[in-house]
Amino acid sequence: MIHINRPPKSRNPQSLNPINSLQNPSFSQSRMPSFLSKSFLRLPPKSLLFPMSTVAAAKSRLRGVVFDMDGTLTVPVIDFAAMYKAVLGDVEYKRIKAENPSGIDILHHIESWSPEKQQEAYKIIADFEKQGLDRLQIMPGAAELCGFLDAKKIRRGLITRNVKDAVDLFHQRFGMMFSPALSREFRPYKPSPAPLLHICSTWDVQPNEVMMVGDSLKDDVACGKNAGALTCLLDEKGRYGSQDFANLDLTPDFKVSSLIEVHSLLKSNFDLTP
């Protein structure tokens, strides 16, 4: 069942209108497009919440899609909670988790540590990541989505907070190449917009012609929003809701539960002319 944000007619939050497009979001209920029957969720930013009209919206042009890797292109296999506990210790982990209910940014946290302590922390993180590489699996729908983008001549990029070795193994094992493919050796890493802006510059496209797809609200959606790109949150297990968006003041443009839905979303909502 689809859920869609609608603009309030009054203070009653149940009284909301449907949103259709980033460029011209207004449309008549009598002309509600067929894509609303799809299972993906369109979540417009607050600035787009205004009354509907009868004006039909033109499709926005999309020239590139940038993906997160772990948990987006690959099945999540790293036990992040166990990794954070190993780095921080149980007591510190519980304290930081309580202060950051939306998630712990372990890389940012250890940047303030001494070089010796950082080295030890990075070694623990690398051990967990290596275990993840041994069990690396492609996400269902990833190969088909990449094939669709290639057929449409839509560029594909990758941004991950994992290491370059993991990206290289991903390319080799699954035969899908992303370019540019930026790992955490590129600084600053997500949620900074820098890696996404670098990819846009390399492609010679505007950020608003690119979509960032990832499974992390605080990293992937934040990166895309800060860069001025479109954003799509992959939420396989329904972890995120309106309260999470409010807590971080981040609302993705789209929310899906699978990469297969991204395929449908792109065809229904965008001009994919190269």
Image (cartoon, rainbow, N blue to C red):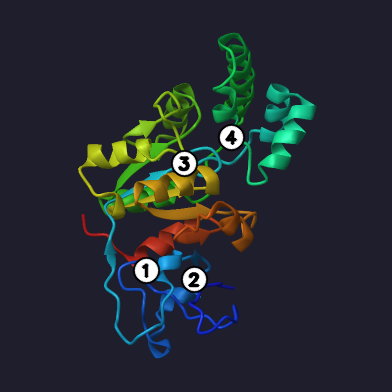
Q: Which residue is mark 1?
A: 268
Q: Position of residue 183 (x, y in %)?
A: 43, 29
Cα separation, mark 3 vs mark 1, equals 22 Å
SS label for mark 4: loop
- The residue shown at (42%, 64%) is 264
Q: Position of residue 144 (x, y in %)?
A: 42, 51
Cα separation, mark 4 vs mark 3, equals 16 Å
Q: Which residue is mark 2?
A: 38
> Which mark identifies residue 105?
4
Quadrant in which the N terminus is drawn: bottom right
* Residues packed near mark 1 inside 10 Å, few (<14), some (14 to 19) or many (20 plus): some
Task: Check contact, mark 1 vs mark 2: CB within 8 A.
Answer: yes
Q: Which residue is mark 3?
A: 68
Q: Position of residue 124 (x, y in %)?
A: 64, 19
SS label for mark 1: helix
Callout 1 amino acid:
Ser
Callout 3 amino acid:
Asp
Q: How many marks?
A: 4
Left or right, residue 33 beside residue 248: left
